[in-house]
Amino acid sequence: MSFASKVLAVGASFRLLGPNDTMVRSKKTVIAVTAVRTGSGKSQTSRAIARILREHSKNVIAIRHGMPYGNLLKQSCQRFASEKDFKKYNTTIEEEEEYQPWIDNRFVVYSGFDYKQILKLVEREAQVIIFDGGNNDTSLIKPDLLIVVTDPHRAGHEINYYPGFVNFLMADVIIINKVDSAKKENVKIILNNIKKYNPKAKVILARSELIVDKPQLIKNKLCAIIGDGPSLSHGGLPFGAGSIAVKRYKGIIIDPKKYAVGSIKETFQKYKHLRYEIPAMGYSKQQIKELEETVNKVPCDIVIDGTPANLKRIIKINKPIVEVNYELDKESIKELEKILKEKRFIKRR
């Protein structure tokens, strides 16, 4: 809003569009999952809900908040069902970080920017639509249930960022994620803000469980960590799942900053909060090349891939790779299933 102040100071007017102006209405059941900041864990929550619905014989299609780059006219409506579609739509690493997990879980996901056209096509395939939100934006499809994810590693951000605070106020369900790795006092800050600003919301205290494919390779090894680009950069997250995995399995984290080249070096310089994770920036072929060069220059034993994307397919890394992913914990999934039954999105058994 500091920019808004500058606009007003020179005498100009502007309008903030509200959800009723920006949401497209659907004929089908819609569950939207948004967040107060990027990197909170909304996509793992979206996928958990999709799996619950599939187990109850519902045909589920996801619509991912659009982030097309390049020729927008060619990317107005995108359908991703396999990795082959990445080449078809000339996707960036940031896009693949969001679509890859859906494909790995055998779901179709749509994206683009023409949401009226996207919704028209999705309604032909789906019984239930899940809107998997991006950044901290409001849903672009009007939901029948709005689930909002918060992050206690950035406690207080839920009321200090726009439009994340809008999501926080509108939420039917608020998930406080990562309670297993966050400080108790930070969890309490969010609980107090829920009581103050949205006391009617149902609250779930959730864990983001690590899935590490080769944890035995980490102990006592020098580790270079690659993390989710947007979460680490403009998301303000100083570390991600890769750092948690290295600490848990007693590896040694190498500071990559002095080995960074080109735009990766510039990213470290711009975002001073970044610590020891290399942000997976890949918005062009040149930047992907610079990411590859940066990773390969770090004098380490292994590389920890903490991104949702399949980096082995995108860049050539000259060291062994340990993949780190994360999913919502089982107890939280049970809580979500209970809510879906209460809302009659699925039948009680």
Image (spheres, rainbow, N blue to C red):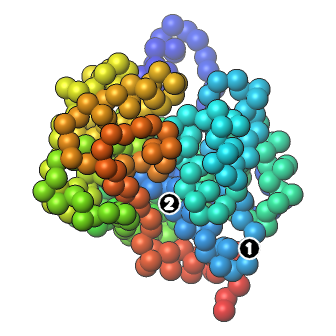
Total marks in image:
2
Instruction: Tell me: residue 173, above or below residue 234.
Output: below
The disc placed on residue 93 is none
In front of the other: 207 or 99:
99
Residue 126 position by quadrant: bottom right
Residue 120 in the image: x percent, y percent? 85, 49
Which residue position is annotated with label 2? 44
Residue kind at label 2, given as amino acid type: Gln
In front of the other: 234 or 78:
78
Q: CA distance from mark 2 to mark 1?
A: 19 Å
**Mark 2 surroundings: few (<14), some (14-19) or many (≥20) residues within 10 A:** many
The disc placed on residue 58 is 1
Residue 64 in the image: x percent, y percent? 63, 48
Instruction: Tell me: residue 130, above or below residue 137.
Output: below
Identified at 56% across, 51% down, the residue is 100
Image quadrant occupied by the C terminus:
bottom right
Question: Which residue is at the far top?
Answer: 10
Identified at 61% across, 71% down, the residue is 51
Residue 343 position by quadrant: bottom right
Instruction: Tell me: residue 263, above or below residue 329.
Output: above
Image quadrant occupied by the N terminus:
top left
Disc 1, SS: loop
Residue 18 position by quadrant: top right
Identified at 31% across, 29% down, the residue is 294
Residue kind at label 1, given as amino acid type: Lys
Identified at 47% across, 21% down, the residue is 286
In this image, 103 relative to 293: left or right? right
Which comes sooner in the sequence, label 2 or label 1?
Answer: 2
In front of the other: 131 or 222:
222
